[in-house]
Amino acid sequence: MFRKLKSKIVASIKNKKINVFLLFLILSFIVLVVLKLSTIYTNTIVFNINKTNVPERYLVLNDSSQTLKVTLRTSGFNLLKYYFEKPKINIDFSQNIEVSKDFYIWNTYQGFSDLNTQFNKDIEIVSIIPDTLKFRYDINAIKKVPIKLNSKLSFSLGFDLLDSIRLEPDSIKIIGPKILVSELNYIETDIFILNDIKTNIDKSISLNLPTNKNKNLNFSEDHIKIKAEVDKFTEGHLKIPVTVINIPDSLKIKYFPKKLYVTYYTSLSNYNQIKANDFVITCDYNNIDSTSEFLKPQIVKQPKEARNVKLSQEQIEFIIIE
């Protein structure tokens, strides 16, 4: 019994010694890392170029080989972040840059102050290679094209659109090389599918932009709003007088029937607003030949709220009175 207790005590002491050793080892490592990162280093880092404020009428052609090798003198803490992300330097095309016939030209002499503000005050810029960058550019074409809705809509029984679907905006501006811009006459939306519709539509949808040309083309929008008012619809019936026009002065005729029914489709909200005098039905005597015994009625006026307007019959009998 005494031996077991003694062995447990010895093991406990040994474990504590190991834990203390590991703790000191970790603390020593942390102190070493802090000392290393606190040391001043001089390192050269490759920065990619991020072009900003390029005038809209110009297109700066992409060139992934354009980079700046910047030698920095600073602590390890400040340098550490450049090894965990792809570093970029902004070059502002609205200032401190020259424009020639074919190139934008940036140099360290004019752009150094703007470059320097992009670094922490504790970072010293030792050198920049190369000291000059040339960016080839082309004149952009600007074109406004309509948006086409690519949709599959189905409505609940008795429901329909109160008016046409609205796209906001209904067109977009394309900016890019003329040869590419001229090929685009419209932009389609992604397919918009909506089933069992019985309420107003207010949705956002992405545009189907040409991805193979995206690198050299800029689009004013990448998505739009789709809006429409939806209402319950019903069928209406009205009896409308028929008028015969262009009867020669030398003739008198009788025709039957004098009135025709029209059927139409309209929303419940507009149903009571539609009246018989909103419709006009005429038969043009000039449109018949000498052997015909029928006039052809036509709806020449109808309210915009009425859809799918149909006549109860397509012929009207007439006789000439001697």
Image (cartoon, rainbow, N blue to C red):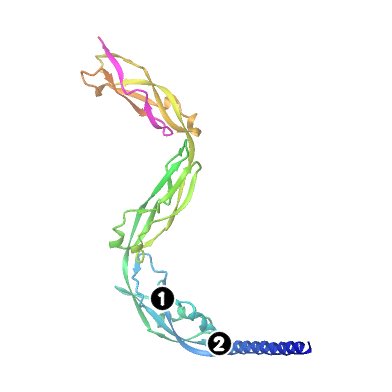
Q: Quadrant of residue 287?
A: top left
Q: In percent of the image, x 35 and y 24: which residue is there?
A: 281
Q: Is residue 95 visible?
A: no
Q: In percent of the image, x 36 and y 79: which residue is there?
A: 133
Q: Earlier in the sequence, mark 2 or mark 1?
A: 2
| Three-letter code for the amino acid on which mark 2 is drawn | Leu
The crowd level at tag 1 (other Cα within 10 Å; few <14, some 14-19, many 20+) is some
Residue lying furthest top = 322
Q: Which stretch did the figure color magenta?
A: 302-321
Q: Is residue 318 visible?
A: yes
Q: In screen coordinates, is 11 left or right of 223? A: right
Q: Which residue is mark 1?
A: 49
Residue lying furthest right = 2
Q: Quadrant of residue 289?
A: top left
| Residue 20 point in image, percent of width and height | 68, 88
Nearer mark to the viewer, of 2 and 1: 2
| Residue 65 point in image, percent of width and height | 35, 78
| Three-letter code for the amino acid on which mark 1 is drawn | Ile
- The quarter in which the N terminus is drawn is bottom right
Q: Quadrant of residue 235?
A: top left
Numbered mark located on residue 37 in the image: 2
- Magenta residue check for 304: yes
Per the image, label 1 sits on a secondary structure element best described as strand
